Amino acid sequence: MKVISPEISPRMKELIASGAVDEHLPRHFEPADVDGCRMVVAATDEPEVNRRVLDAADSAGVLCNVAGRGGRGHIQLPGSVTRGPLSISVSTSGASPSLTRRLRERLEGEFGPEWAKLVGVLSELRSEIQSLPPERRDQIVDTAIDGMPLAMLAGGADAEMIRDYLRRELES
């Protein structure tokens, strides 16, 4: 991923430092910047710059998302929350980017780091759970989500305790 901007946010600085961003060009956008791209995202606070990025993408036949501008651009990107192997996305199909952002923020609060651990344990137990009749499988997953395991993880329990708890449930 390449970022072109004369100024960057603290979060973007973190992404660059972590290697999540391949290249940062500390300058203003130029239409040739879209050459060779498959997709570009115009995400500035300047509508005129975003329009120029979209126009350049149109001319080059490149897909473009204009962040925060529902209906503009070729594609809309969902708001996503990732907790380990768990990925939850929400979209208003461009109708209200602000609502998408607010829903994503709510999901971040609802689904904390304990969910990553829970998905990991359920993945480890998958073959054992799959060997059960469908209604029993549902009971085990319901127990994991609505019962003690998730609450225990939120309280600091480790995955091994949850694995043992669910194995006892599988045997009962």
Image (cartoon, helix red, strand yellow):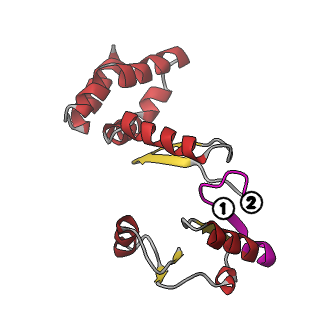
Taking depth in this image into account, of 95 and 61 the one nearest to the observer is 95
Left or right of residue 31, residue 152 in this image: left
Taking depth in this image into account, of 77 and 116 the one nearest to the observer is 77
Q: State the residue lying farthest toward the left.
A: 156
Magenta-span inclusion, residue 66: yes
Disc 2 target residue: 74
Left or right of residue 11, residue 49 in this image: right
- Three-letter code for the amino acid on which mark 1 is drawn: Asn
- Three-letter code for the amino acid on which mark 2 is drawn: His
Which numbered dot is residue 27? none
* Location of residue 114 by image quarter: top left
Which numbered dot is residue 65? 1
- Residue shown at 59% from the left, 49% from the top: 78
* Location of residue 95 by image quarter: top right
Query: Which portion, as a residue range, is magenta?
Result: 57-73
Is the residue 100 above or below the residue 139 in the image?
Answer: below
Q: Position of residue 117 (x, y in %)?
A: 32, 40
Q: How many residues crowd mark 2 within 10 Å: few (<14), some (14–19), many (20+)?
A: some
